[in-house]
Image (tube, rainbow, N blue to C red):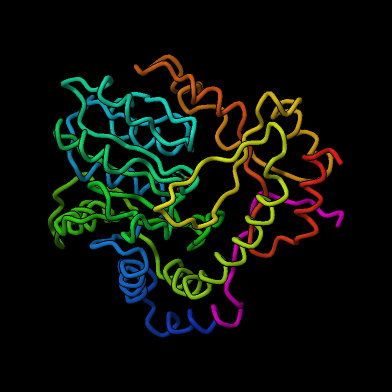
């Protein structure tokens, strides 16, 4: 029990199973470039995620870069997004030579405050990039309505929302595109990996070309693409891990419920609200440490650390406050974003996290 406890621990399929699964590669020698397993995993994930179209990518970040690039927005155009996210979201916008415009988030669940989006729209606005942060889903209806009225594209950062459904629909089927991350630290992974989900079938061909250097034919390059292809080893890891995902999720649920039962009602500890029409994937357990708790988030964070518990301040600082972006872009007052990012902390949660470890964490938080 004296081992350190980290915020997550990567899931892995049984070793023998993965080794058996990669064996055929020693015969085919087809290791990457949209091979057999790339195709198989795309099909499996299309079904699992309940999305009409899906394109695999080398990672979540490139999924977002490629998804944004596929819409050919004019250079310098504005994209409304939130700063309460992983730095990747803002980087993907800026690396596409677009300007992020920061919108505030909601107190209730940390997602974009849809009531403030319209005030930020100008004639230069082309898209909205909201984040389903911790798998809490954005107000997809209100965002669709605004996007329709102003002719904007909606590209969701759904990196945290793998497998989340809203009213029985795959979360990746909302908006013009949604990106997922399959990084080793995410609930479902391909070591590194990601995907773009979309409804319009023509997006598939655009992404296929973009992720492969813009190459259209042996002697024809039509776009300034990148190399964002998922290789066959990654795809096989994804096929293996997908089989065990239901177990991963149910084991996480047990631990999530345990935390909530024993931490719920602790003065000054708040949980985000969850939309009742959306299922939870139990990817993260964020808590908010409010004034009534009596000590600050940072104090609690250090106290946990002294006891070998490595909780994480996801997401602090705001991306808009990082030196590469600070004071460069327009935006609303970010009052909720600022206060939430000062209060939030993500607690350790993974499928083989021992209940004894959770009890220890709860004791530290409750100062027992
Ligand atoms: C993990 C993550 C990404 C980036 O995904 P990678 O697979 O690590 O490149 C993007 N956005 C959010 C919100 C993330 O958590």
Counting the numbered discs, the total is: 0
Q: Where is residue 329 in the image (x, y as percent from the top left)?
A: 36, 18
Question: In the image, is residue 201 above or below residue 366?
Answer: below
- Which quadrant, please, contains the C terminus? top right
Q: In which quarter of the image is the N terminus?
A: bottom right
Residue 15 among magenta residues: yes
Residue drawn at point x = 13 percent, y = 49 percent: 222
The residue lying toward the viewer, choosing from 40 and 166, is: 166
Q: Report the magenta residues as a range.
A: 1-18
**313 horizontally vs 152: left or right:** right
Q: Is the magenta stretch mostly helix, strand or loop?
A: loop
Q: Which residue is drawn at 53% across and 73% down?
A: 244
Specify the quadrant of the image occupied by residue 68. top left
**x and y, in percent, of residue 276 in the image:** 44, 51
Q: Is residue 120 magenta?
A: no
Q: Position of residue 273 (x, y in %)?
A: 51, 42
Q: Which residue is drawn at 78% across and 55% down?
A: 357
Residue furthest front in the image: 265
The location of residue 196, given as percent across then percent down, is: 31, 54
Is 64 drawn above or below residue 112 in the view shown?
Answer: below
Task: Determine the image quadrant of residue 263.
Answer: top right
| Residue nearest the viewer, comparing 171 with 14 | 171
């Amino acid at each position: 029990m004296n081992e350190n406890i980290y915020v997550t621990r990567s899931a892995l399929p049984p070793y023998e199973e993965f080794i058996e699964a990669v064996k055929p590669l020693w015969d085919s020698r087809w290791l990457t470039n949209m091979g057999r397993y790339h195709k198989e995993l795309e099909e499996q994930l299309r079904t699992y995620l309940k999305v009409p179209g899906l394109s695999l990518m080398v990672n979540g970040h490139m999924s977002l870069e490629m998804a944004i690039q596929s819409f050919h927005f004019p250079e310098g155009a504005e994209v409304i997004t939130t700063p309460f996210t992983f730095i990747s979201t803002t980087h993907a916008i800026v690396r596409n030579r677009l300007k992020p415009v920061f919108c505030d988030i909601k107190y209730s669940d940390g997602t974009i405050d849809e009531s403030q989006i319209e005030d930020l729209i100008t004639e230069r606005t082309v898209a909205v990039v909201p984040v389903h942060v911790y798998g809490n889903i954005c107000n997809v209806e209100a965002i669709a309505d605004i996007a329709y009225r102003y002719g904007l594209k909606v590209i969701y950062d759904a990196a945290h929302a793998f497998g989340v459904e809203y009213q029985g629909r795959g979360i990746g089927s909302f908006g013009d595109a949604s990106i997922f991350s399959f990084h080793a630290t995410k609930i479902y992974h391909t070591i590194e990996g990601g995907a773009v989900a979309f409804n319009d079938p023509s997006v598939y061909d655009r992404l296929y070309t973009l992720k492969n250097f813009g190459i259209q034919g042996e002697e024809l390059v039509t776009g300034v693409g990148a190399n964002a292809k998922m290789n066959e080893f990654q795809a096989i890891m994804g096929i293996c891990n997908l089989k065990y995902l239901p177990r991963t999720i149910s084991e996480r649920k047990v631990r999530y419920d345990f935390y909530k039962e024993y931490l719920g009602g602790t003065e000054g500890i708040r949980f985000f609200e969850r939309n009742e029409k959306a299922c939870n994937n139990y990817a993260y357990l964020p808590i908010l440490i409010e004034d009534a708790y009596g000590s600050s988030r940072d104090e609690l964070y250090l106290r946990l650390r002294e006891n070998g518990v490595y909780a994480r301040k996801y997401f602090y600082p705001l991306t808009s406050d990082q030196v590469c972006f600070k004071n460069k872009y327009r935006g609303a007052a970010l009052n909720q974003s600022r206060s939430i990012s000062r209060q939030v902390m993500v607690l350790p949660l993974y499928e083989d996290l021992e209940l004894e470890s959770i009890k220890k964490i709860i004791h530290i938080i409750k100062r027992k």
